[in-house]
Image (cartoon, rainbow, N blue to C red):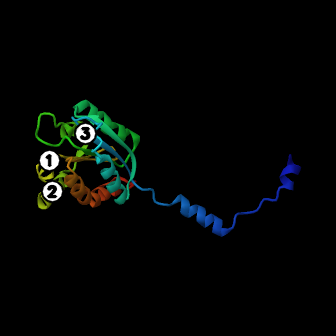
């Protein structure tokens, strides 16, 4: 056996290889997101490309979209979908829909049941921005934001205008929250 090892010419890797390997290991990993689309309407509508819009906006914001989940507007279904993202270790769970005042709108209640800490400033910023751009459903949304474990959970209203405006508003805020959650303290 020792003859076999002696026959192998083992060389130390050069500095360039070691540096490249180290840089690769330290490359920033994009934050991961789970999108939960909440609706009491049929999911078979060929005109509904909400998932595509949200996915594109998250990618533009630097997120990796792990999955898009569609759930009925039932508190238990919404809660389970959010918990799936939290347990799965995503950085952001973004719910879309179910934030209005109708009896069927249950997303904020389902979210509140999952989160550990409320972050009311994000919801307030999304509503203020929605009002400024004329997205009435964003301005009147009951959507909330909070943290569950190390996951940020945000509710957005479902109109295209509310989604576009909400994403541009929440991107720097959520990025800050995720960075805060990823700080290690001794």
- For mark 3, give the secondary structure: strand
User: Distance of mark 1 from mark 3, alpha carbons?
Assistant: 14 Å
Residue 46 horizontal side relative to residue 7, left or right: left
x 11%, y 37%: residue: 102
Q: Tell me the mark number nearer the camera, choosing from 1 and 3.
A: 3
Which residue does the image show at 28% across and 35% down from the upper left? 71
Q: Residue farthest to the front?
A: 46
Question: Which residue is tagged 3?
Answer: 38
How far apart marks 3 and 2 lie (CA) works out to 19 Å
Q: Quadrant of residue 111?
A: top left
Instruction: Tell me where residue 14 appears, x and y as whole percent.
Output: 69, 67
Residue 95 appears in the rendering: yes
Q: Is residue 24 left or right of residue 99?
A: right
The image shows residue 82 at horizontal and vertical percentages of 30, 39
Q: Quadrant of residue 16?
A: bottom right
In this view, the residue in front, 68 or 50, is: 50
- Tell me which numbered mark, 3 or 2, is placed earlier along the sequence: 3
Query: Upstream in the sequence, badge 2 or badge 1?
Result: 2
Above or below, 37 relative to 128:
above
Residue displayed at 22% across by 31% down: 74
The answer to whether marks 3 and 2 mark residues whose Cβ atoms lie closer than 8 Å is no
- Disc 1 marks which residue? 141
* Residue extending farthest right: 3
In x, y percent, where is residue 148? 30, 43
Viewer-proximal residue among 105 and 41: 41
Q: Position of residue 120 (x, y in %)?
A: 18, 51
Q: Answer whether labels 2 and 1 touch (C-beta < 8 Å).
A: yes
Residue 109 shown left or right of residue 56 in the figure:
left
Left or right of residue 169, residue 183 in this image: right
């Amino acid at each position: 056996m020792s003859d076999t090892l002696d026959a192998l010419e083992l060389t130390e890797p050069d500095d360039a290889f070691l540096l490249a390997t180290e840089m690769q290991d330290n490359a920033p990993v994009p934050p991961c997101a789970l999108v939960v689309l909440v609706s009491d309407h049929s999911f078979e509508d060929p005109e509904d490309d909400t998932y595509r819009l949200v996915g594109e906006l998250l990618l533009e914001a630097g997120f990796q979209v792990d999955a898009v989940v569609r759930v009925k507007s039932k508190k238990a279904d919404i809660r389970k979908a959010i918990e799936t993202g939290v347990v799965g270790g995503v950085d952001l769970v973004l719910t879309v829909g179910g934030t209005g005042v109708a009896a069927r709108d249950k997303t904020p209640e389902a979210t509140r049941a999952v989160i550990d800490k409320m972050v009311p400033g994000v919801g307030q910023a999304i509503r203020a921005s929605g009002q400024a751009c004329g997205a009435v459903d964003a301005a009147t949304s009951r959507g909330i934001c909070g943290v569950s474990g190390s996951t940020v959970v945000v509710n957005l209203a479902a109109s295209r205008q509310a989604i576009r405006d909400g994403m541009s508003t929440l991107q720097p805020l959520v990025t800050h929250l995720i960075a805060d959650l990823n700080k290690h303290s001794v």
